[in-house]
Amino acid sequence: MKKKYLYFVWVALLIASVGFVVIKYTKQHAAEEAAVYLLLPRKNGIINNPEWIFAKNNIDKLLVKLRINPKDTKSMIALTNAYIAESRVSGRTAYYDKAAMHTVDKVLALEPNNFEALTLKSLLYLSQHHFSEGLAAAETAKKINPDNSFLYGLLVDANVELGNYRQALDAADKMVTLRPDLRSYSRIAYLREIYGDYPGAADAMKRAVTAGATGQESTEWCRVQLGRIYENTGEKEKALFEYRLSLAARPDYAYAMAGLGRIAAFENKYDSAILFFSKADSLIDDYGIRENLALMYKHVGKGKESDALYNNLINEMSYNAKIENSDAGIGHYSDREMAYVYLNTNNYNKALEHAIAEYNRRPKNIDINETMAWVYYKKKDYAAAQTFIAPAFATNSQNPVILCTAGLIMAKAGNKEKAKVLLIAGLKNNPIMQEEVEKEARQELNRL
């Protein structure tokens, strides 16, 4: 009798606990459905910037329209685009990606075959580094409208990140045929760079810049990418010119400021580099900029400042990973970035853990293979490093970092002739790269 009583008590408790979870989930879901995402002040605190005022007024008007008519999908699409644009300018991807995904999902709940909503969902997945999901959403949209240039840009981006380079080339050809503009030219440039054609990449990126409106974020982003191409080919003065031109067209543009920081670091002007990276970090939330700043502090012996920034990066990226685990489709995968942070703090086991996590998502991507190879190189596992550096040349990449990484690995593996060829190619023209790789590559080449 006692056992039977305890059994009923246990069942009652189980039902109550399940009911509590269901009620909690329902309340949480209802709260998320009712959430209103307002425009946040930008990181630099400037709220009288005409661009920000326009964005705020636009978002406020759209939110009012949706309060009046919650099923106004046209306004939802416009609001999603506004969130995406602000995410790009401010770097607050965690907040605005969630806002945009929240909004676009409402559109798709009402209109499952809404083409623009599907393309925006694909774009958001790509922003979050959910590349397989982004590709799937783009392929679904393609069935609805197979002749849209923006769609093919998504297919280029997703396939590049997943290492499907042939498919990316096909999508880029279709895209530029449909609409030769900034978006298509910039993707042609990126693919040419991936395939080792730096002169062709620079030419296409110049076309992208010319096709855009001077001072707009998208145009200045392309101008900065042109500067990065010049960094890789050792054309420092040309890179400097592009970054300065970008800052003249769009004052305080964080990515142009970071470009000046990289060149200052390359010239061993670490104090100047710190000023540039600090300024850039004050303007936008960007992991890469903060990591460069931490490296500069390390170079000048400011260990506390460097460690604080690295810890901040690890905590922030780990937090975003937890968001991913609790809120599918919102969190941002950043395992490759985490791998490099741990490499810079000499925690090679954690670096490998995150590199493997990223590799498992996209094993054909050449950059991920180079990351895996570099982590194993730092762990002195040269056989494993050789295994991963080989696929990094699937596209005949002439990226100086990949070439130098491969050369260092070959040297440790005893293939001195191959190492010499790779290191000479990587260091040719004195490209701008992270000091650790360049210094080690030059030292190894001198020993060969």
Image (tube, helix red, strand yellow):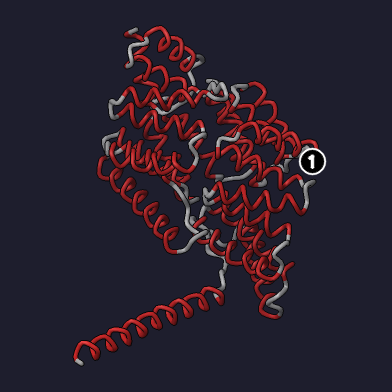
Return the residue found at the far left.
Answer: 2
Q: Is residue 411 left or right of residue 188?
A: left
Name the residue at 72% across, 73% down: 72
Q: How many marks?
A: 1
> Where in the figure is residue 5, as x and y percent of width and height?
24, 91
Residue 52 locus on image (x, y percent): 61, 59
Q: In which quadrant of the rendered image does the N terminus lie? A: bottom left
Please provide percent x and percent y for residue 26. 48, 79
Instruction: Give the labeled residue for mark 1.
Output: 179
- The crowd level at tag 1 (other Cα within 10 Å; few <14, some 14-19, many 20+) is some
The residue that appears at 24% across and 89% down in the rendered structure is 4
Q: Is residue 361 left or right of residue 63?
A: left
Q: Quadrant of residue 380?
A: top left
Q: Is residue 371 above or below residue 19?
A: above
Residue 310 appears in which quarter of the rendering? top left
> Which residue is at the front of the view, 117 or 19?
19
In front of the other: 23 or 400: 23
SS at mark 1 in the image:
loop
Image-based side of 327 in relation to 222, left or right:
left
